[in-house]
Image (cartoon, helix red, strand yellow):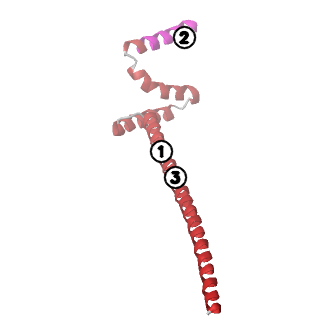
């Protein structure tokens, strides 16, 4: 039993070193699937799917998904930056309008005060005539 396990390990180890580690990465995922679930059909389907995906996109499925997630994160960051910029500009414009209204109110009060004084003077002139 131990000798048989040793032969299998030696075969896998020699396969790994003699092939330059290239196919072992492609076979590793399905091999883990077969070992964990015992479902050979599922492992074969996974291997076929990964190979077809790599042919069509030029990337492995994991790297493709990783790239898509990073794109979505970048888009969310751009949206958040844009939102913050708009909020900042709205605050600045609001403050300018508030300041402008204060100046307009002060000017309006000054004009009303002058009008009242002028009106009083005119009334006094009429009375004095």
* Residue 55 found in image quarter: top left
Classify mark 2: helix, strand or loop: helix
Q: Position of residue 109 (x, y in %)?
A: 61, 72
Which residue is outermost to the top? 3
Drawn side of residue 114 relative to residue 66, left or right: right
Q: Which residue is mark 3?
A: 83
Q: Are discs 3 and 1 less than 8 Å apart at CB?
A: no
Q: Which numbered tag is attached to residue 72?
A: 1
Q: Is residue 62 above or below residue 1?
A: below
Drawn side of residue 20 relative to residue 92, left or right: left
Q: Is residue 128 above or below residue 113?
A: below
Q: Position of residue 13 (x, y in %)?
A: 46, 12
Q: Viewer-proximal residue, 125 or 45?
A: 125
Q: Viewer-proximal residue, 88 or 44?
A: 88
- Characterize the magenta stretch by its predominant secondary structure: helix
Which residue is outermost to the front? 129
Q: Which numbered tag is attached to residue 111?
A: none
Could you tell me which quadrant the C terminus lies in?
bottom right
Q: Residues within 10 Å of mark 2 (few under 14, many from 20)?
A: few
Q: Are discs 2 and 1 less than 8 Å apart at CB?
A: no
Q: Which residues are magenta?
A: 1-15
Q: Earlier in the sequence, mark 2 or mark 1?
A: 2
């Amino acid at each position: 039993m131990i000798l048989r396990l040793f032969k299998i390990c030696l075969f896998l180890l020699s396969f790994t070193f003699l092939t330059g580690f290239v196919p072992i990465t492609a076979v590793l995922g399905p091999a883990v699937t077969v070992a964990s679930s015992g479902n050979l059909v599922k492992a074969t389907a996974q291997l076929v799917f990964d190979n077809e995906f790599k042919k069509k996109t030029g990337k492995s499925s994991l790297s493709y998904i990783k790239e898509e997630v990073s794109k979505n994160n970048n888009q969310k960051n751009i949206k958040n930056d844009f939102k913050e910029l708009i909020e900042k500009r709205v605050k600045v414009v609001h403050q300018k309008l508030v300041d402008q209204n204060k100046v307009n109110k002060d000017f309006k009060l000054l004009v009303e005060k002058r009008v009242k004084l002028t009106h009083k003077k005119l009334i006094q002139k009429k009375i004095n005539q």
